[in-house]
Amino acid sequence: MKLPILIALVGFFQGIHTSKQPNFVWIFADDLGYHDIGLRNPDLHTPTLDKLATKGVQFKNNYVMHACSPSRHSFMSGRYPFTSQMQKDVIFPVSPDCSPLKLKFLPEYLKELGYGTHAVGKWHLGYCREDCMPTSRGFDSFYGTLDGEGDYLTHMSAGFYDWHTNGTVDRSKSGQHSQDLHTAALADIIERQTEEKPFFLYFAAQNPHTPLQAKKKDMKKYKNQNLSDTLKKYYGLITGLDGMVKTIKDTLEKKNLLNNTYIIFLADNGADVGIGSNEPFRGTKSTLWEGGVKSLSFIYSPLLKKTGYENDGLIHITDWMPTLVSLAGGSVPESEGIDGINQVAMVTDARKSERKDMVYNLDMESQFGLPSSGQIAVRDERYKLLWGFPGQNDGYGLTTTYLAKVEEFKVIYKSLTTREKRAGRFTYPEDDQKVMNRLLAELTVSVDDIERGTGFMRLFDLIKDPYETYDLSTSDEPEHQEALHKLITFVQTPVGHYLPG
Ligand SMILES: [Ca+2]
């Protein structure tokens, strides 16, 4: 028997594919606005990202969660966060939480399929016990930070030093910029790869998350532009990210691995208020408006059958887990009951999306008296129901002036048409806080409201009105009422069985 046939048979009996399995490089940008690359905003310098996006497939309806931990949880587990008590804001430092251990993560599937698995960057899925650590959840190696944000140079987060190599605190990195550390680690990991063993490299970048500690060399690109200091730093971090992606691409090319690799780039949520831009979409990070959850994203690979176009298919962050497992030659058993849908046909062949509806989030837990990031939003292929409190930053620059009269505010909320200014968290001077409390009490819906189909709700036609300007919930059009009823029912059941009883 010839050797290649023997290897193929051994692989078959081991359940491992020896035909060419692709490599995956997954890149999460942290808090990157929907239009914050040079391709969409000429103020920005991101030549590598522009090139990869243009030569790959740009996604126009690729949805993530509203914040870091829920997005990462959904990517790793293929599940909506509300099914696992991960729907709130984020996992806070030294908090006794982590993404539930009973869930099987993507790198565990890929390891079973013969992959090497490496994580670089930010974890943010909990670390309160050893079992929660990246190297306990399917990664061969981990290099980076466990918390959600920290100093780029001192690596201090909430009073603790946070830089780790695998499971060990690595104090030697204090004073070295995380961008340099990440760049070196990415190059080193790819340099060690061979064509014989496929790999999954998960890079969760710190850039361009606050604090905005861009490197001087990246800031130089913006020194002659008429921009605020905040924007210059934010853009500098994005240019820094572009440099890291260039390192990834160049090293893959040098190792002759690029031809068999998918590079997938996503913002993990929309830009934060007052920093990046999600315009013209409404809302910011930590809201259920489109600006909070529509991801700047693309895939690049010589393996794609159709490239150089914009794909408007509906795809959710949960879909990528079964999609990558499928591309690797495996499958996620139906008995696992994940929420993600295998979207290989859409992603690689430009076929139609398999997804017909989607849950943005369902958060009926109260935190400081309110859901931290909005209550309920769902959509089908056309319409979106936003039910209850949408999150604090609605993207229309509402000021406390509007809070003087709750009724007036509610009218504005329902009929926004021409407001273009995007800004501001609500500020709470003492007197306004009382008014705000009344307002929020009226916007917030209860479990009883959901069961009855009542409470404050808005319906948007995302085809005609992607910027969520015209509320259709009280429209007389039968089609609108039919869509509203359908989406209310979608929340009530089966989604609603996750509501606290
Ligand atoms: Ca984030």
Image (cartoon, rainbow, N blue to C red):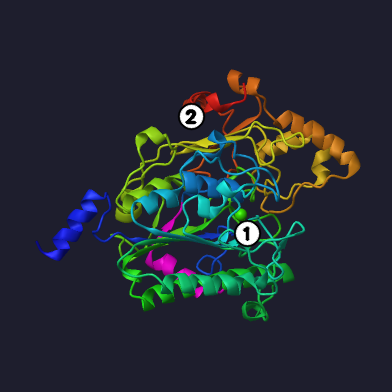
Distance from disc 2 to disc 1, alpha carbons, whole Å, reads 30 Å
Q: Residues within 10 Å of mark 1 (few under 14, many from 20)?
A: many
Residue 166 seen: yes
Residue 73: x percent and y percent? 54, 46
Task: Give the total of numbered labels.
Answer: 2
Residue 203, compared with residue 215, is above or below; it is: above
Q: Residue at x 88, y 45 (%)?
A: 429
Q: Confirm whether residue 453 shows in the render.
A: no
30, above or below 246, in the image: above
Q: Which residue occupies the extreme right position in the image? A: 431
**Residue 435 at x, y = what percent?**
84, 35
SS of the residue under disc 2 = helix
Please name whichever residue, 462 or 195, is drawn nearer the observer in this view of the structure.
Answer: 195
Is residue 322 left or right of 444 when viewed as pictured? left
Q: Which residues are magenta?
A: 44-60
Depicted 412 relative to depicted 172: above or below: above
Quarter of the figure with the N terminus? bottom left
Mark 2 closeness class: few <14, some 14–19, many ≥20 residues within 10 Å:
many
As for residue 59 lying within the magenta part, the answer is yes
- Describe the element under mark 1 as helix, strand or loop: loop
Residue tagged 1: 277
Amino acid found under the numbered disc labelled 1? Ser
The answer to whether 90 appears left or right of 73 in the picture is right
Was residue 320 drawn as part of the magenta stretch in this picture?
no
* Residue, far left: 1
Question: As rendered, which of 29 and 20 lies closer to the eye?
Answer: 20
Residue under pointer 2: 483
Amino acid type shown at disc 2: Ala
